[in-house]
């Protein structure tokens, strides 16, 4: 798995986990998201910065219905996966492999 696919898997999985099963970890995850957002800003990665901004807003308690970021490609796939999984209230560990495969397929990779 590429580093890029891995970062999206980590972002999705940790966000889902903190929004469903581990709400006590939200502050810690939020701090990590801020750090990632600062790195994206330093690299002028505007779409990653937008993704992280909307996830931070979600973690801060903004209603999902109000969050409508403009994202494309893997950024959109990551966000949609987070939203769909939270809405379905599914255990994220069941879908982690599925998400990794979906995100990696976008980049023509195969997960083993």
Image (spheres, grey):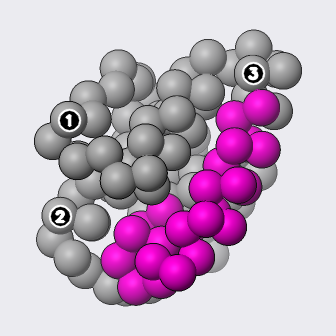
Q: Which residue is mark 3?
A: 41
Q: Nearer the viewer, mark 2 or mark 1?
A: 1
Q: In this rendering, would 65 be left or right of 20?
A: left
Look at 60% across and 30% down and name the residue there. Answer: 48
Question: Is residue 28 shown in magenta?
Answer: yes
Q: Name the secondary structure under disc 1.
A: helix
Residue 66, which numbered label? 1
Q: In this rendering, would 1 be left or right of 91?
A: right
Look at 34% across and 26% down and name the residue there. Answer: 69
Using the rendered view, name the quadrant where residue 26 is placed. bottom right
Residue 87, which numbered label? 2
Query: Magenta residues?
Result: 14-38
Q: Give whichever of 78, 17 is nearer the camera.
A: 17
Q: Name the secondary structure under disc 3.
A: helix
Q: Earlier in the sequence, mark 3 or mark 2?
A: 3
Q: Give whichever of 65, 75 is nearer the camera.
A: 65
């Amino acid at each position: 798995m590429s580093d890029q696919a891995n970062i999206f898997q980590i972002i999705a999985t940790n966000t889902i986990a903190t929004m469903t099963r581990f709400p006590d970890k939200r502050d810690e995850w939020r701090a990590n998201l801020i750090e990632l957002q600062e790195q994206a800003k330093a690299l002028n990665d505007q779409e990653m910065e937008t993704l992280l901004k909307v996830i931070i807003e979600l973690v801060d308690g903004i209603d999902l219905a109000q969050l409508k970021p403009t994202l494309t490609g893997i950024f959109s796939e990551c966000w949609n996966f987070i939203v769909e999984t939270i809405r379905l209230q599914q255990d994220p560990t069941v879908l982690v492999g599925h998400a990794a495969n979906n995100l990696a397929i976008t980049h023509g990779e195969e997960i083993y």
